[in-house]
Image (tube, helix red, strand yellow):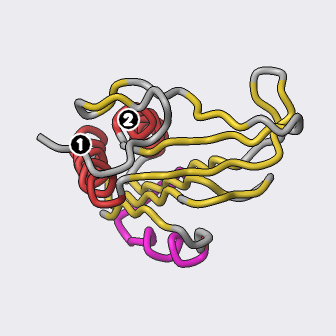
């Protein structure tokens, strides 16, 4: 079980191999890619920023919850940071379980919880030259209304 924040491209072969286990009868994965549009606006690229230590700690908690709830054999996830181009893999989740229902449910649970709970921020760069932080709200006790804070959260 591992949740990572990475500034490097995601190596799918390594992750898939790490999931292999003789007790697993099912594998489900989710890949989130940088797309060329959002809310009717053409997107050229994205930037992700994160508090890596806090995000990895909370991500590990999410994976542990999924393992217990869905009786998983293994669970891995990686979220990219930095400037990503169209088509780049931004987030990957992979799980194995004895049966497909557990694998499918866990994969969805992990990505939904990660999007809701992790201190990860996304900035879109649009074709018209404007850039904007998206979906910034109160997370983990601090406001991200103007994008990521300039330092780690306190308190």
* In the displayed structure image, the side of residue 80 where residue 109 appears, left or right: left
Is 104 or 33 nearer to us in this picture?
A: 33
Magenta residues span: 13-29
Residue at 42% from the left image edge and 47% from the top image edge = 99
Question: How many residues crowd mark 1 within 10 Å: few (<14), some (14–19), many (20+)?
Answer: some
Query: Eyeballing the image, is 114 above or below 20?
Result: above
Tell me whether the residue at label 1 lies in contact with that at label 2, contact meaning CB atoms closer than 8 angstroms.
yes
Residue at 36% from the left image edge and 42% from the top image edge = 118
Residue at 65% from the left image edge and 33% from the top image edge = 132
Question: How many residues crowd mark 2 within 10 Å: few (<14), some (14–19), many (20+)?
Answer: some
User: Where's residue 141, x and y in %?
Assistant: 23, 30
Which numbered disc, 1 or 2, marks the residue that appears first in the sequence?
A: 1
Query: Eyeballing the image, is 65 above or below 145?
Result: below
The quadrant of the image that shows the N terminus is bottom left
Residue at 27% from the left image edge and 53% from the top image edge = 54
The quadrant of the image that shows the C terminus is top left
User: What's the mark number on residue 94?
Assistant: none
Q: Label 2, secondary structure: give it.
A: helix
The answer to if 25 sits in the magenta stretch is: yes
Mark 1 vs mark 2: in front: 2
- Check disc 2 and report the residue beneath it: 113
Residue 144: quarter of image: top left
Residue 129: quarter of image: top right
- Check disc 1 and report the residue beneath it: 65
Mark 1 → mark 2, Cα distance in angstroms: 10 Å
């Amino acid at each position: 079980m591992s949740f990572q924040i990475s500034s490097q491209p995601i190596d799918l072969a390594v992750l898939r191999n790490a999931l292999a286990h003789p007790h697993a009868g099912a594998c489900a994965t989710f890949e989130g890619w940088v797309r060329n549009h959002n809310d009717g606006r053409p997107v050229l690229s994205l930037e992700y920023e994160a508090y890596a230590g806090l995000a990895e700690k909370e991500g590990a908690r999410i994976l542990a919850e999924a393992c217990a709830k869905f009786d998983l054999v293994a669970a891995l996830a990686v979220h990219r940071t930095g400037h990503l181009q169209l088509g780049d893999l931004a987030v990957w989740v992979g799980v194995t379980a004895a049966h497909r229902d557990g694998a499918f449910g866990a994969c969805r649970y992990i990505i939904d919880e990660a999007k809701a709970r992790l201190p990860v921020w996304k900035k879109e760069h649009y074709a018209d030259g404007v850039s904007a932080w998206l979906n910034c709200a109160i997370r983990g006790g601090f406001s991200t209304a103007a994008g990521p804070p300039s330092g780690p959260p306190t308190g």
